[in-house]
Image (cartoon, rainbow, N blue to C red):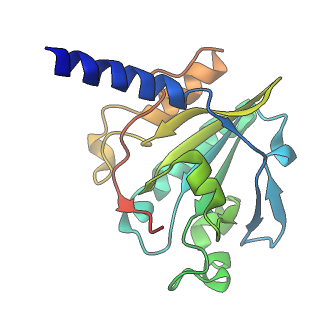
Amino acid sequence: MKIFLGFFALSIFWTTAIFGQKVSNIKMVDAITNQEYTLDKNKSATAQVFIFYTLKCPYSKLYNTRIKALKEKYTSSNITFALVNPHAGQDSETPEKLSSLPFAKDNKLPFLMDDQQVFTKMTAVKKIPEVVIITSGPTGYSIAYRGAIDNNAQAMQSVTVHHLSAALDDILNRDRPSPTVTRAVGCNIKF
């Protein structure tokens, strides 16, 4: 019983520790436009959604249709979307290859190169694709949600829980996302 209570308390602490975790302004280069991207650039956004995405991970491509639909649904609510590549510069994830990704270009998604993995480590992301929602407040930027886009990476028609959509709806309703953390499934990020 003591072990169970210990794990329960730890899980509650871990979940609440993520919500509101402060993050500093970041600087990454958008592979599509070759322009610098910062959190400050979109400070007035209701929320900034970052989806960790690589060219090699097959799970990334499985989410293309869902990412496009989410961006279309929430852009009018002043929510921005960007892809983040934590493997930029490694293996075949060269800036030239990243800049030619049709999915990002066609959907006007910045494809940010986190070549030093500063943002990846700051947000504690471990999987591809994994999502981080960052909001801005009077004390700076903080993580509102981190985790999965939904509960079925492989079969879009079998999704029963839309984690990212629910978190964004909570934010738009001025509520704290619940849950603030979910377990993402996909490829491991190489550190």
**Residue at image location 57% in from the left, 18% down from the top:** 176
Apparent side of residue 67 relative to residue 84 in the rendered image (left or right)? left
**Residue at image location 84% in from the left, 34% down from the top:** 44
Q: Is 187 located above or below residue 16 in the figure? A: below
**Residue at image location 39% in from the left, 20% down from the top:** 12
Apparent side of residue 140 relative to residue 86 in the rendered image (left or right)? right
Nearer to the camera, 162 or 35: 35
Nearer to the camera, 191 or 153: 191
Nearer to the camera, 1 or 12: 1
Apparent side of residue 31 relative to residue 50 in the rendered image (left or right)? right
Apparent side of residue 59 relative to residue 39 in the rendered image (left or right)? left
**Could you tell me if residue 49 is visible in this image?**
yes
* Residue 178 pos. (x, y %): 46, 20
* Residue 124 pos. (x, y %): 52, 48
**Could you tell me if residue 179 is visible in this image?**
no
Q: Is 162 located above or below residue 87 in the figure? A: above
Q: Is 146 located above or below residue 89 in the figure? A: above
**Residue at image location 50% in from the left, 85% down from the top:** 91
* Residue 129 pos. (x, y %): 45, 55
Where is the N terminus found, in terms of image quarters? top left
